[in-house]
Image: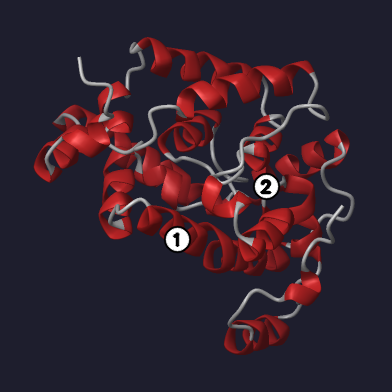
Amino acid sequence: MSMEPARLRESPWRLLKNAAGTPRDLANKLGRLARAVSAYADGASLDGRLERLVRLGYVQTPPSRLQLVIGSVDMLRFWISPAAADYYRSKGIDFGFHQVLRFLDDPASMVDPTGFLSSVDVIVGHVLQVVHANPAYDLQLLESHEDGLEELERQTRAMLEGSHPRQASIGAIVEDPGYHGRLLAYVQAYRDDPDAALAPIRDNVANDPHWARVERTFGTLPAAMRYFAKMPSTPLGVARHLLFVRQFPVQLAEPSA
């Protein structure tokens, strides 16, 4: 049996088919997407999530909703998308096609960059389908859900055993055959001692000073929340930020340890 992952050995058409799944799968995915979009109107759930993160010690000064919005935009445009594009370019993988596969596998995972409005299953699926630059943020976020980390460990084991319900669709996306093994080891270490667990940093981030600086700012939930709290708090300030800040603002970066 070939050890090369399906993402690298299957044809584009087969990858699209596997990522999309059956008509029943697609209907379920659209339902999850509708619930994810409707969560944006549920301010009480967002407030509850932030309160839980404050109790866990991951948030000292909760950002306002406006700061959360602009902060998540910065996270997406300065960190998530460009760092991922750089990584897939280095692997010779088309990033646009990769995003199509992700959308077909689970569109709900692509409408909430911060994950604050996502369910446990959506967050876990997102962690499983994407080789993360640093999964620490997502594990910290899962701590705000009952049994979130336990569910991540369970589903990661299922991926490694070949028994996950989304085995084929996630397999159509993940290009690194060692990713889920590293993820499981990290989740287990994190559950034992979060402070001692060493997150597996993606190679294009670990080996690049620019991405390393941005990762310090957005790679963990406490650091990201500190950045969000520094964002403009008025509509005019937000508009100015979006218009004039076109590169990662290094003056707002998390300091090195």
In-image side of 134 versus 14 (left or right) = right
Q: Earlier in the sequence, mark 2 or mark 1?
A: 2
Splitting the image into 4 quarters, where does residue 248 fall? bottom right
Q: Which amino acid type is shown beneath numbered disc 1?
A: Asp
Seen at 89% across and 50% down, the residue is: 60
Asked if residue 28 can be seen in this view, the reply is: yes
- Residue 181, placed above or below residue 132: above
Disc nearest the viewer among 2 and 1: 1
Q: Which mark is residue 34?
A: none
Quadrant, the N terminus: top left
Residue 40 in percent (x, y) is at 54, 53
Seen at 84% across and 61% down, the residue is: 255
Q: Which amino acid type is shown beneath numbered disc 2?
A: Leu
- Residue 121, placed above or below residue 157: below
- Residue 88, placed above or below residue 13: below
The residue at which mark 1 appears reads as 86
Q: Say few, some or many: other residues with alpha carbon within 10 Å of mark 1 (under 14 / 14 to 19 / 20 or more).
A: some
